[in-house]
Amino acid sequence: MSSDLLDALTALEKQKGISREILVDAIEAALVTAYKRNFNQAQNVRVDLNLGQGTIKVYSRKDVVEEEVQDDRLQISLEDALLINPAYEAGDIVEQEVTPRDFGRIAAQTAKQVVTQRVREAERGLIYEEYIDREDDIVNGIVERFDARNLYVGLGKVEAVLPMTEQIPSESYNPHERIKVYITKVERTSRGPQVFVSRTHPGLLRRLFEMEVPEIFEGIVEIKSIAREAGDRSKISVYTSSEEVDPVGSCVGARGARVQSISNELHGEKVDIVEWSEDPVVFVANALSPSKVLDVQVKEEDRSTTVVVPDYQLSLAIGKRGQNARLAAKLTGWKIDIKSETDARELGIYPRFEEELDESAVDSEVVDVYSDDEAQHEPNKDLQENNETIDLYQDEN
């Protein structure tokens, strides 16, 4: 074996990140194939590469048998084996060098393609290991090409697939455009690793907030839940155990800069940020922001709630095509039935415990309380303090 080959192994190890052992195994396998193909040999053989001496040797391998030899290409009698070495026993393997005189030239020509293929497979393995560790992570990519169903995003070493179902309907993509995508799945295929990405997954929104908000990245503020209708509107609930940190304000940023940056990345998707609470009364009321809420009645047995809102806030609470209520239900995990104040009064479900309003004003779970002589009702201030939200756009309703 020439020094040029050794130099090539070293260069491949440095440039491709493939260990020399993998390359040596690839060459040995290629040489076994070359020997059998070019010399019409069917016996078992082993190729030995001696990197120190730079030699290549081929050894035939035969099983030692006591009975009659069935195939002299694969077996050798115990009697003949003892002539080679008296220490052989039945079941041992006898190796004899069978290196052809011109094997080096033929092997080099035949093995080149096989070695190239093995190197390519090794590279694919390294790429798979790199991206399998990045599942559920966000990466930057460049739009490369389209077909009838998919968009293909270049990630550097691999081309990721962005299926039509994972594309935001309101977005348009241009060749060579740089976009952020969320890796949902990595598969090993015969053609190499296949990476699938998404622009609609809630995880993309989570990762964007982790990148944009230091308090989330450091674990001071926790994202509890996300409800997303990609390209249109999302809601995210946040929580912190630190009394010195405002979780909603941290995500909004100065003059809304942080959430505005995330919205821009998602091409104008609205993002509502609300404070999480373990109390479903408070949490459901917060989740329905920017609508005001008068009362939240909880049914634990079927995880459902009845929410009472002012008459003029009913359409805002429900949202366009029911979007606000739908996202709030996804965010909280509670079913939400919204009633206007007038309907709730007619049904006799609001106000609750009317005769005890004065006594229960402090301890009652009723979210909002009105005095009987007030013509214009105002929401309870305690609720509003827990109902912080950011909506980048005026609601269309």
Image (cartoon, rainbow, N blue to C red):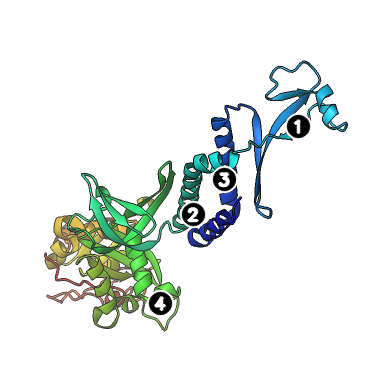
**Which one is earlier in the sequence, the residue at label 3 or at label 1?**
3
Identify the residue shown where x is 56% and y is 53%: 5
Q: Which label sits on residue 93?
A: 1
Gap in Å between the C-alphas at discs 1 and 4?
Answer: 66 Å
Counting from the top left corner in percent of width and height, residue 309 is at 19, 65
Identify the residue shown where x is 16% and y is 58%: 346
Counting from the top left corner in percent of width and height, residue 333 is at 34, 56
Look at mark 3 in the image and give the residue it sits on.
27
What amino acid is found at the position of numbered circle 4 in the picture?
A: Glu
In the picture shown, does residue 38 fall above or below 178?
A: above
Look at mark 2 in the image and give the residue it sits on.
126
| Crowdedness near tag 3: few (<14), some (14–19) or many (≥20) residues, C-alpha within 10 Å | many
**Which one is earlier in the sequence, the residue at label 1 or at label 4?**
1
What amino acid is found at the position of numbered circle 2 in the picture?
A: Leu
Classify residue 322 by image quadrant: bottom left
Query: Which SS class for mark 3?
Result: helix
What amino acid is found at the position of numbered circle 1 in the picture?
A: Ile
Q: Nearer the viewer, mark 2 or mark 3?
A: 3
Look at mark 4 in the image and give the residue it sits on.
215
What amino acid is found at the position of numbered circle 3 in the picture?
A: Ile
